[in-house]
Amino acid sequence: MSDQPRVADGTAEGEPAVMPGGIGHVGDEPRVEGDAFAGGSSDGGPSGSGGGRPILVVAMAVGFIAVVFIVILFTRDTGESEQVNSPLLGKVAPPIVGSTIDGSTYDLDRERGRWVVVNFFSPTCVPCVVEHPELIEFAENGGPFGDAGVVSVAFATREVEVAEFFEERGGDWPVVARDTSPIVLDYVTAQVPESFIVDPNGRVRAKLIGGVTEEDLNNAILEVATRLNAPAEEEGS
């Protein structure tokens, strides 16, 4: 694990936005309907019954390759976390409202009064898989003050895959997995995993990219809390 990064101060401008075309549910297989791809004789005779099958197989293969490409494109190539600037630092966290994989409704605004880690992830992202046990430890221990929460937001993933991931690997915090593209755009998330530290007043205080550990999250919260609670320097000191 590399040295712990320092929390960025202030609001940074100019972080590239996520291209809308890069976000969306993936994994849906292409469909071939009707006789549009069915084979036919050159003299106008009846169409062959098996003419469309090779095209369907090719289309399915292309769809699978596209899914793999998207997963690789939007997955970070490191398992180590790093704190970086974000245009959201110091600002009220964008809303996160939606249905969770257990059927309840989540609203980030209801978390006011405690620290919250907003984690963007995908079940097919290797660093996301590696960091998951650390998130479980963090959630169970409640962070450095004992009451911190976690919410996960699925990135370009079907809801059923997210539910299967948590059923297999554990974790009982809220997970928003349906129609998450607007949330991803609001948080300017380009790759996963990414985690945001939201303070008890609902403001974004840190952004971490790459796989996090419980220690990473605890240290980030403690650094921010120390900075926010530090008395202002007396004028002329």
Image (spheres, rainbow, N blue to C red):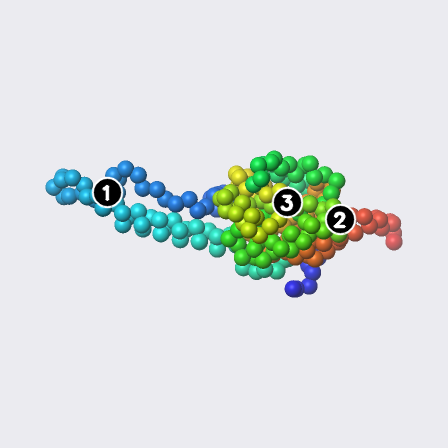
- Residue at image coords 75%, 40%: 113
Q: Secondary structure at mark 3?
A: loop
Quadrant position of the N terminus in the picture: bottom right
Q: Position of residue 128 (x, y in %)?
A: 57, 54
Looking at the rendered structure, the kind of residue marked 1 is: Ala
- Residue at image coords 44%, 53%: 68
- Residue at image coords 19%, 43%: 48
Q: Position of residue 64 (x, y in %)?
A: 40, 51
Looking at the rendered structure, the kind of residue marked 3 is: Trp
The numbered dot on residue 173 is 3
Whole-number angstrom distance, CA of label 3 to CA of label 1: 49 Å
Q: Secondary structure at mark 1?
A: loop
Q: Are marks 1 and 2 in contact (CB under 8 Å)?
A: no
Determine which residue is flagged by label 2: 146
The numbered dot on residue 38 is 1
* Residue 197 vs residue 101, the one in the foreground: 101
Whole-number angstrom distance, CA of label 1 to CA of label 2: 63 Å
Q: Position of residue 43 (x, y in %)?
A: 12, 41
Q: In this view of the protein, can residue 109 be seen by the observer? A: yes
Q: Secondary structure at mark 2?
A: loop
Q: How many numbered circles does the render carry? A: 3
